[in-house]
Structure formats: C-alpha cells, structure tokens
Image (tube, helix red, strand yellow):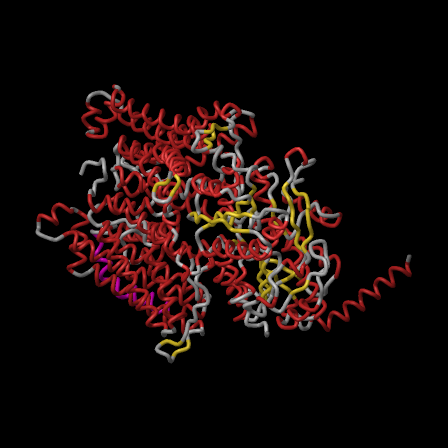
Amino acid sequence: MKTNDSMFDRATPYLFALLFLIGLVAPFAVYPTFLMKILCFGLFACAFNLLLGFAGLLSFGHAAFLGTAGYVCGMLVRDVGLTPEFGLIGGTVAAGVLGWVFGVVAIRRTGIYFAMITLALAQMVYFVVLQVRATGGEDGFQGVPRGNLFGVIDLSDNIAMYYLVLFVFCLGFFVIYRTVHSPFGQILKAIRENEPRAISLGYDVDRFKLMAFVISASLAGLAGATKTLVFQLASLTDVHWHTSGEVVLMTLLGGLGTILGPLVGAATVVSLQSELADSVGSWVTVIMGGIFVVCVMLFRRGIVGELQALIQRAGIR
Amino acid sequence: MEIFGVPSALLGSQLLVGLINGSFYAILSLGLAIIFGLLNIINFAHGAQYMMGAFVAWIALTKFGVNYWVALLLAPIVIGALGVLLERTMLCKLYKLDHLYGLLLTFGLALIFEGVFRDQYGISGQSYPVPALLEGGVNLGFMYLPIYRGWIVVAALTVCFGTWFMIEKTKLGAYLRAGTENPQMVQALGINVPLLITFTYGYGVALAAFAGVLAAPVYQVNPLMGSNLIIVVFAVVVIGGMGSIMGAIVTGLGLGLIEGLTRVFYPEGSAVVVFIIMVIVLLVRPAGLFGKS
Amino acid sequence: MQMKKLITLACSAAIAGLSGTASAQISGDTVKIGVLTDLSGTYSDLAGSGAVLATQMAIDDFIAEAKPSFKVEMVSADHQNKADIASNKAREWFEREGVDAATELVTTSTALAVMKIAKEMNKIALMSGPASTPITNEQCNDVSVHYTYDTYALANGTAKAVTKQGGKTWFFLTADYAFGQALEKDSSAVVVANGGKVLGSVRHPFPASDFSSFLLQAQASGAQIIGLANAGADTTNAIKQASEFGITPKQSLAGLLMFITDVHSLGLKSTQGMYLTTGFYWDLNDATRAWSKRFFDKQKRMPSMVQAGQYSSVLHYLRAVKAAGTDDTAKVMAQMKKTPINDFFAKNGKIRDDGRMIHDMYLVQVKKPEESKYPWDYYHVRQTIPAAEAFQPLSESRCPLIKK
C-alpha cells in the first residue's frame, strides 16, 4: 500500500475513467436492481474502509448508521412527503449526527475496545428501532415511494434510479478519495501508523479521529438512505449487528486500506449472497464464515491488495 | 410490605433471579477476560462455543445416554480440545498482527459453527431435561426456587472463584500473569509460553462450554442461543475492564442484579440497561471499573 | 385392447388439441412458481425446505391429475429473512426469469416487500408463512393471497375458547415490539368481549432468553391464564421455564402464536395441557394422514400448517391457471377467488377480496405425555372453528379494497 502508491496514482485516473464507463453501460447488460445493491453496499464498505483502512479504527456498529439513515430517509419521503433528494440529505445528516454521538463516547479508546463499544452502541440503536412504533418493528418500514427527483425525474423507472445511485456512489467515492489524499487523510494515516508520535507532533488526535468517524458515518448513512429508495423499504436487518459484520467482511475481502477494495468486496459478497441463496440454502452463513477465515488466514491483503502486490512484483521484474 | 410499589417478595425473587442470570454473565465474561488477558484476542466465537457445549451435552444424552453429570465434565473437555485445535492451527498465526484479525477470525468461526449446527439440528432447538437429582424446587417463602437454578449459582460461583484462585494464588497462575505482562521475559525463564497460551485458550473455551451445559436444562438448546448473549457479555467485559479476572466476575453478577431490578421497574428497558451502564462507565472511567488504564 | 389404446390415443390427441389453443395464452408455455422462504434462519423448521418439498409435491400431483399441456417449473431461494434480499430476488424472478407467482414468504417483512413488487409487476404473491394482519388490511392488494393463518385467527381462536372454558383472568407476557403488542391488544379485546378480565401484562425485550423474572411477575398477578404474546424461541423458552418454576400447571399458558414445530421441540412434558389454534393438524382425518405420510417419508418430519398450506395454495393456483387457460394475473386471481378450495387442507375454503383465504381452524389441546401413542401424536382436537368465525370479519377490515 505504501510503496506502490506512486505507480497506482499514475494509473488511477485511467482506471477510474474505465470503471465509470463500465458503470454507465452496465445496466444494459446486468440486472439494474442488483447493480444498485452492489453500489449501495460498495459505498457503505468504502465509508467503513475510510475508518478502518485509513484511520485504523474498527467500528463494529456501522449498521446503525446505514439503518438509521434508511429509516429517516423512508420517513421523510413516505410520511412527510418530501422529494427523494431531501430524503437522501436527511438520512445522511441523521447518520452524521448519530456518528458524532458514537464518536464522542467511543473515540477515546482504540483497537478492540473501540470495536466493542461501537458494537454495544449499535445494539442500543437496534433496540430503539425495534420498539419505536414509527419504524414498523419486525414488519419493516415498507412502501417507500421512489418519487420524483427534484419533483421532475420519475425514479420508478429502474434505469433512472440506477443513474441516481451511480451518481450518489461516485459522489461518496469522490469525497472519500479526496479525504484520503488530503492533508487530513495524511494525518489520519500518521495516527494509524503511530499515534503517540502524531500526538507529540501537536495534533489533536481525538478531534481528527472524531472527524473521520463523522464523515464515515455520514457516508454510510448516504448509502443506507439510497438503499431505502432502491428497495423502497428499510428493515431491521439494516441495523442488526450481522450487517456490521458483513461490511467488515466486504472490506476485508476486497482489500483493507485500498481505495477500490471495498467496492470489489461488496460486489463479491452481494453476488455470492444472491447466487448462494438459490443453490445452497442453509449453508450461506457457513460459507460466509469460511470466507472470513480464509481471508484472515491466507490473504489479508484482500482481492485488490493481492492484485496490487502481484502487479507490483511483475513490474519490478 | 412494598418497596416503591413493588411487593418485597417479588423484589426478593427478582434479585435472586438476577443473581442466577448474573452467574451466566460472570462465567462467560470470565472466559473472555482470561483469553483477552493472555492472548489479546476478543473471542467472538465464545457464544458459539457456549452453544456447542450445550449441544454436546444434548447429543451425549440422546445418542449415547450419557448423563448430565458426566456431560458437565465431558462437554468442556471436548469443546476445550476443539479450542486448543483452533488455537494451534489458526489463532497462533495471528499474534504478531493487529488484534483485529483475531476478532475477525473468531467472528468467522462463530458463523461457521452456528451454520453447521443449524443445518444439522434445525432452528427450533432441542429440550434437555433437568437432571433427576436436581428436579423440583423449594419454597423460600418469597418465591418458589427450582433446585436446579440454585445449583447454577453454586456451580458457577465455584468455578469462577476456583479460577480466580488458580490465577491469583498458584504458581501456574503466576506464570500466566507474568506471561500477560511480559511474554519474552517469561520465555527466557524457561517457561513454555506458547503452551501456556494454548492451555489458556482451551480453558477459556471450556468455561464457555461449561456455561452451555449449565444452561441446557433451563434454556432451549438452539444453534443461536449464544449469538445474542455474547453481545451482552462483551458489554459486561468492557464495563468490568478488559482482562481483569475479578472485574469480570463481580461485574457479571452485579449486572445480573441490575438487570433483574430493571425487569421489575421498567421491563421494556431491561435489554438496553447493560449498554447504558456501559456508556456511563466509559465516560467516567474509560478503562472500565476494574481495569488499569 | 387395441381399441382401448386407440381411444386413449384419440383422447389425448383431442386434449392436446384443446389445450393447444389454451396454452397459447400461457407465457412461454411454462408456469413458473418461485418459492421464496427462509432456508437457514428462525423459520426454517416451520417453512424452509419443507415448504419447497410441499411445492414440488403440489406440482407433481397437479401434473399427474391434470396432465396439463404447459410445463410447470419451480425455483426456490433463501431470503434469509431479509426484506431487501426477498425484494431483490422477487423482482429478478418476475422481470427476468418469467416467474408467475412468488410463494410462501414467511416473515411479514419479506411478505410485505414482495407483495408490493408483485403488484407493481402484475404478478401473484401466495403467502403461506407470514403471520401479521396488515397483509390483508392496510397493506392489502388484489394480487396477493394470505393463505394459511394469521395472528388474528390464532389469537382470537385461542383467547375466545380458553375464556369461554373458564379461563377468566389473564396476564400477558408480551414481546416488546409491534407484533407482540398487536397480538396482546387483539387477544385482550377477545378476552374482555367474552367476559374475561385482563389483570396486567409485562413487556419483555425481543429476543430474550431468560423469562424467569417476567414469569414471576405473571405468577404474582395470580391470573388463571398467562397469554404468551410472542413467537418462536421466546415462546418455547417461556414455556420451558414456566414449568421449571412450577407456574404450570397451577396457572395455564395459552400460546397465541404456536406451531407444531414448537411443541415438537419442547416435548409434551412442558407443553401438556396448553391450548392453541392451528390451521392444520396432520392427524385430523384419513386425507390429512395420507398426505402427511407422503411428506414425512421425504422430510422425516410431520408437516407444519405452513407447509401443508403451501401445498394447498400452489395446487389451487395451478388448477386456476388450467381452468382459466391463461397465466394472466387478473384472470387467474378471479378464477382462484371464484373457485372454492377443497382438498385435505381446507373444506370449502374461500379467498376473500382482501386476499384472506378463510377456512376452518382447529382449537387443539396438547396431550399429556402418557396420552401420546405414536410419534407426533401431540394434539386433542377440541373444537373446529368455522371459517366465518375464525378470521377477522370483513366488517372490521381496514383494507382499502373492501367497499363498505
């Protein structure tokens, strides 16, 4: 990650342009709803990766942001009757505020403590969502209309919806990319590598971490709000800790700390879930668990990380 | 007599019930604390290992006619041995890496264990009978206490304090504590640290399995019985202070009591009370009640 | 001999000719049924692979009985109780794979999500597994059938019968979320309407594993009946612990949402004497026994009401397709609603305009261990609740399709 930055930086613009083109034509080849799901979870995983891959903080409660934003967006659109863009903004802001609260409580601890605290906090959010009447409890928050974007573009058309999701993803991805490559991102990396040193250099470490946490939470929220519009529902699954585990898996599988890894990981996990659902039935969780184990034991760099290493080795030779 | 509008008999019984639940928290968080102390790994598979302990007891009874008392010994040994195997083949390769990988590996293992048992035994669970010797109950005046529940408290406390004694007062425990502080030094003194670590993980896992066997006659033995419990136990460990043996035991029992009280005064909140306490404790004492910063 | 063969040939040719014209209206000459169920989670015993098997049995029986000129295919998937997976899968099935009906759909969240998609794409949703009443009330639509049971039928049947038989004072143990609260509210109304009294209730978190605190509160209330307004593992744990604390048999439990799978996993010792309402019991009569035995041979378990209902709903659907000569949604729905359902599962079952299939329900009491003579011999059938009384009357319906 560190050594091959320059090489990839040179190739990156072309790679992004290529991916963007693929993104533009993909809905004509692949089922759009499926692609939208990949993009939503991709953004979710990218947001998560900002925290773990670049700031070294493992949050085991990111589902809380995804889910909360989903419900808030759903309520704004279905019950208040706002247009979808306000739903997205509202969901994102709600997740950001929640992220700030989580951050204030958890940020003083690192490593495993941090993971467990975020997990416990997310569990509280789960119980609130379960019990509040407005969320529909176990039945889920159903029947969210996609509505008209800016009151003009009808989103019930899958292709229109797809391009909105693609736009949202690119926006989120851009924010993450800029964050990582800004001085702020450099400080985050410095904190990850050696926190005491960053402190001795005079950085207010907690404040930077909190900021990273809020950005990550907001973007996870943006992903959740978008997901609610796509599927027209928000459900308890979105706030359950299994979802928090899933996003860790996606990021780990794709490549921790790589900019594209989470998207690749999300695409892999979502496709697996969808494929396995038909073929293996009850073995889905076992296979997911197996992937976790294999990733941790054999290729910790993840798909993208391993690819980068491979290319680099070839380049040296 | 009433206290805050609640009959004192009911209050007494709720406290007792809280203590019983606290015993489970204590024994599970003790296992987690021991493992964390020496291995620096959060054992996410703890809940699954607790579940497997219960299943081993159930399988031993239904397939081989092995009774409860044997199972109480057998299940921890079997699951502990499985733990040793996991430690030797997988966990031991992760010590040099970030702690997070241990958490992620055990998380994956938990998914596998739960999935396999779900596939084999279905989801609705199995019933394990209360052992004949402990059937029935006694009337304590303020409540009817099933003898088995009393046994849970006795057994759990014995094991917890036995473990505490072993770690704090024996030579083996001294090595263990020293190994936690400075593994290189202990290794240099000629003590086999990797073996010590393996043994510790096996013991921590065995504790989970022991709790599982204790739980089998009162809860339905089902593949997901550990997965929700484990999150609460995590919170208990965080409140107590990670790695603190006494902290885990005392916090476990204490939270059981507090949860019991919540169930009388505000039952709706009983699921989150542990987490609320956790947040308060972390704001006041970031290292936990018994932890060292 | 020769003659017979000739006639058969002629007949089949005629049938082929006839149905040839009809099948022109069946898209792709194939009727495709999607089974979207929980193959791995909480409801996998209740529905799960058993529901897939039941569907296959229905298809095989239909082909044997009707010799249709069109093909019948089945696809199945695990929705893992996640509404977004269910919604994604259903959309893909309807849009891409030519699935005509999505069926089973256990858990209300997935059912509601798929109903909406079915409506949008003008396909059919046949629901055997989900329990909640919004399916045929606020959220109802004209392409969905709620087939086997719902919480109203179960809670209503049990609460009414138990109150009438002298269980006048009640205390509820309620899972603290929308579903549990609804169950408690509906049952309380029935208890009061039948001259009973509700002494109180306690809300427990969901899911909970230890019920002793809540049970002690129920015990302290002194109510004759403790109503369990929860489901699944919560119910089974509560029952098990009630017997442990000596609460039963002094006070009786009433399971407001219980299935034979729960009784099977708990055993008769701790469930004996309980009343519950069910839409199907395998040991009801010769027809149910015959079908259930076939099911048992393959699945090694007796069918739950969800699985039996799944068979019946798929068979009814296929017969309607055949009778209507088309798989057009509106025509098939009309055909299904106009034809009474008569098979081992339902006698004169009828699908109402709100999508509710109404049929007789059964109030059963769990046998004592010594009364059980053979495996799965669990219930005394105490009463048949006629279809008209069992389900929520249309006059109380909150479904917009019902004109009042």
Farthest residue to the front: give it: B1
Q: Nearer the viewer, residue A149 or A192?
A: A149
- Position in image of residue C86 (x %, y %): 49, 59
Find out whether residue A13 is within the magenta segment: yes
| Badge count | 0
- Position in image of residue C257 (x %, y %): 55, 50
Q: In the displayed structure, would residue C404 be above or below residue B49?
A: below
* Residue B221 relative to residue C125: left or right: left
User: Would you say the magenta stretch is mainly helix, strand or loop?
Assistant: helix
> What's the residue at 32%, 44% (across, down)?
B274
Find out whether residue C11 is within the magenta segment: no
Residue C254 visible within the image: yes
Q: Nearer the viewer, residue A225 or A184?
A: A225
Q: In the displayed structure, would residue B208 be above or below residue A138?
A: above
Farthest residue to the bottom: give it: A152
Residue C36 visible within the image: no
The span picked out in magenta is A3-23
- Position in image of residue C115 (x %, y %): 53, 65
Q: In the displayed structure, would residue B240 be above or below residue A37?
A: above
> What's the residue at 35%, 44% (across, down)?
B262
